[in-house]
Image (cartoon, rainbow, N blue to C red):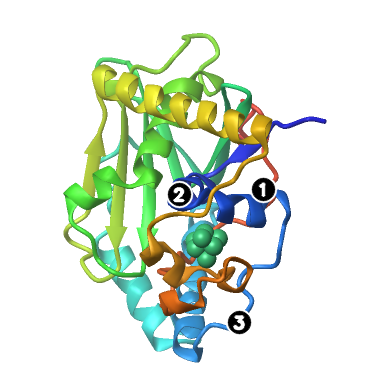
Amino acid sequence: MDNRLSLSQYKLANFLACQHRFQLRYLRRLPWPTSPLPERTEQILQYGQEFHQLVERHFLGMKIIPSTIPDERVRQWWQAFTTHSPIQELPTDARFLPETGLTVPLGNHLLYGRFDLLVLGNDEQERPFAHVFDWKTGHLADADELKSRWQTRLYLALLAEGGSAFWPQVGPLAAEQISLTYWYVQEPTAPVTIGCSATEHQANWAELQQIAAQLDQAIAANVWPLTDDWSACRECAYQIYCGRQGAGTAVPELDETEEPDTPNEQLLTPELP
Ligand code: SF4
């Protein structure tokens, strides 16, 4: 049996939150979530998805006519984006790749991520750089929190390990040449940019390898323990399988861009326009 798994930020976070949840959701593929989201949450997610689609279409070269955007809130977000675009400082000859996925090997598994926008180019010293942009329509987070998120760590690791797919002639991309900017619709003038260093990448990658090894052990032993942290159960749809209904419930923080469980990944072969 092929035990190779494609690991996204969500799968990593779920594995670390509760190995049993990881097994039920991604190996046994039990439906998730089992109950509908509150109407307001659904609506907010929908607005976020509409905004992401608008920005994607923009970077694909399509003309966006604001008056045709049906929802006023999304229209305001679009206005904020066009007025305070965070990409203005980048070289004009850079390549802009919206909704681009990248997959790299991680131990016996694959690490997968999809960027809202990946910008590739050469800096003033003609060194190649990669800059990821992530559009946020949800709750604000400060720079420290964003830096510690799996999304940040995974995106930076993917490009440091797999960026050579974009520059096969020059080899690996230096960690210092990789950055990630979060742009929030609520604070369009204050994007948060996070860089990387070789030391940070080594530590980050070592931890990712350790998690992959933990996963291998769980697969080999077929042991998937329930978490000891009952607070993790509050946002879990599988309480009834574990007898954890007493944990209470909470609506999970949802991301408008969460990918389906089985992404259409390509190993080190990013799609270029
Ligand atoms: S209810 Fe708790 S123990 Fe059970 S799968 Fe979910 S997080 Fe894990």
Q: Are marks 2 and 3 in contact (CB under 8 Å)?
A: no
Q: Secondary structure at mark 2?
A: helix
Q: Dot 1 corresponds to which residue?
A: 263
Give x and y (percent) for residue 93: 40, 33
Q: What is the CA distance from the residue labelled 1 to the residue labelled 3?
A: 23 Å
* Sequence-wise first label, 2 or 1: 2
- The amino acid on which the numbered mark 3 sits, given as a three-letter code, is Ser
Q: Nearer the viewer, mark 1 or mark 3?
A: 3
Q: Dot 3 corresponds to which residue?
A: 35
The local crowd at label 1, few if under 14, some if 14 to 19, many if 20 or more residues have their Cα within 10 Å, is some
Give x and y (percent) for residue 206: 39, 22
* Sequence-wise first label, 2 or 3: 2
- Picture layout, residue 146 above or below residue 113: below
Q: Is residue 63 visible?
A: no
Q: Is residue 217 visible?
A: yes
Residue at image location 32% in from the left, 65% down from the top: 81
Relative side of 271 to 106, left or right = right
- Where is residue 109, by image quadrant? top right
Q: Dot 2 corresponds to which residue?
A: 13
* Sequence-wise first label, 1 or 3: 3
